[in-house]
Amino acid sequence: MSLPQPASPSSQALHVVVLAAGKGTRMKSAHPKVLHRAAGRPLLEWVLALARSLDPASITVVTGHGARAVEVAVAAPGVRFALQEPQLGTGHALLQVQTLLDGASGRVLLLSGDVPLLTESSVRRLLDAQAAAGSALTVATAFVPDPTGYGRILRDDAGALLRIVEHRDATDDERAVAEINSGVYVFDLAPLFPALSRLGSANAQGEYYLPDLVAIHRADGRRVDAVALDDADEIRGINTRAELAEVGRVLQSRINAGHMAAGVTLVDPGTAYIGPDVAIGPDTVLHPFVILDGQTRIGANCELHAGTRVIDAVIEDGVTVFNHCVVQSSRIASGALIGPFARIRPDSDVGEQVHVGNFVEVKKSRLGKGTKIGHLAYIGDAQVGSGVNIGAGTITCNYDGLRKHPTTIGDGAFVGSDSTLVAPVTIGQGAYVAAGSAITDDVPDGALGIARGRQSNKAGWVAKRTGKPPADR
Ligand code: UD1
Ligand code: CA
């Protein structure tokens, strides 16, 4: 006979709450602190990514300062918001989710929107510790060289957690404690809100302090615990721009380490700026100061030289991008050579083995296999076939001041240098355009289009003009 087993605590529903209502005064910013970006993401998005990795029953963000902006920035299925207005402290902030969690059971994981370095494995350790002990509250702590400003963890002689005291309310002895409150907690939901409603605000800041829950639970005879994390860096909060930069560097180095482990060469990992959603194939080499943003995907065996930026683009295998190029929302097919100093603007499709050279701008255009545009050209709204040669200084005149018009260039065509192709216009397959032409009419397949004034030389003109024979000038 099998008896029904009580649900083990670790199988209880997990509700994540992220505090993000604070002002962030020291950022000296018009924007909410949690929307400042580190390593390509708003701070709050890093915390939400951690929350999602735990596959929780719910995620609630407490907003206050800049609430609307925060909600718009991180809106996603499964993320809900509770407004804290006015902001009366961290305990008051958590109280704002009480109605949303009405009737729910299980546990609450409390995270801070400005603590983006916390890892999934540390949070799982905290959750396991709370479940194993069946605590009403388990707080993550760390030992730091300089605990100034943080809440201090006070333990009894046996090491049991007694209470948490804020820096401003602490005595000198208490301030000497190096173990700090991370602001990350796991709560048993059942006693949480009744205890929270009993928080007072008789302290240095006149706020409802969440850490005071420790003393309340203890007074009621419930178990509380503190779990020290190995890496104190993980709980670093961001209060200033300097901290934002430091934490950004740590996040970036984690991303970069992941790519190197997967077979990507970073010539200088300290200057490789790779967004969190970027994918890169093995044996690709990134030189210093390469920036890869958004949903960019880079194939295998590519080489991206210094100073190049790629945004939301797909670069296939074996592509070389020379120095200082910008590629956005486009595809570069395998074997292409781009740059130096080329700009590939959105909605371009650059075919296999294409060469786009120095100071060439391509916008919303398709370039067929093996086509060459070596120097100083603007190709916009164009369909260019394969094996086409486009000379230096060629311009598609795609804009008439009101509308954009298309240019079509057939396979194997040859466009001489410094030609202007006034769109809409078609250059036929295998057709030639003479250098310096202003092409306003279609050039048929296999024809030569030439559209420029004829040269005439005026013999002796200079001597007449200056009154001197050429040798005396
Ligand atoms: C808090 C803790 C402190 C801990 C530290 C860790 C309290 C009273 N103190 O201090 O023990 O060492 O975090 O970083 O909890 N927030 C709101 N509403 C509010 C106030 C704050 O949502 O009314 C949010 C903030 O946006 C932030 C988080 O709560 O995400 C922490 O608030 P903050 O003011 O930074 O607390 P600290 O003084 O750093
Ligand atoms: Ca803080």
Image (cartoon, rainbow, N blue to C red):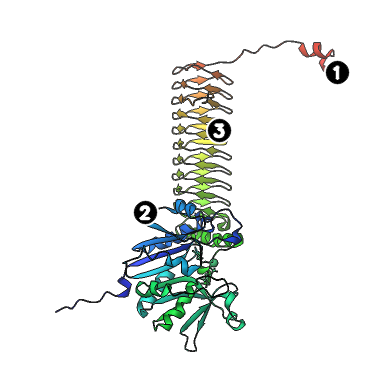
Counting residues from the N terminus, which is met first, the one under dot 1 or under dot 2? 2
| Location of residue 399 with respect to 457 vertically, above or below | below
Residue at image point 37% right, 75% down: 191
Residue that mark 1 sits on: 472
> Residue 281, image x and y in percent?
44, 51
Marks 2 and 3 sit apart, C-alpha to C-alpha, by 47 Å
Specify whether residue 156 is in view.
Answer: yes
Residue that mark 2 sits on: 77
Counting residues from the N terminus, which is met first, the one under dot 2 or under dot 3? 2
Residue that mark 3 sits on: 374
The mark lying in front, picked from 2 and 3, is: 2
Question: 264 or 126: which is nearer to us?
Answer: 126
Q: Mark 1, residues whose alpha carbon is within 10 Å: few (<14), some, or many (≥20)?
A: few
Marks 1 and 2 sit apart, C-alpha to C-alpha, by 83 Å
Question: 296 or 14: which is nearer to us?
Answer: 14
| Location of residue 374 with respect to 174 vertically, above or below | above
Marks 1 and 3 sit apart, C-alpha to C-alpha, by 42 Å
The mark lying in front, picked from 1 and 2, is: 2
Which disc is residue 312 wearing? none
Counting residues from the N terminus, which is met first, the one under dot 1 or under dot 3? 3
Looking at the picture, which amino acid does disc 3 mark?
Gly
Question: 122 or 139: which is nearer to us?
Answer: 139
> Residue 463, image x and y in percent?
81, 13
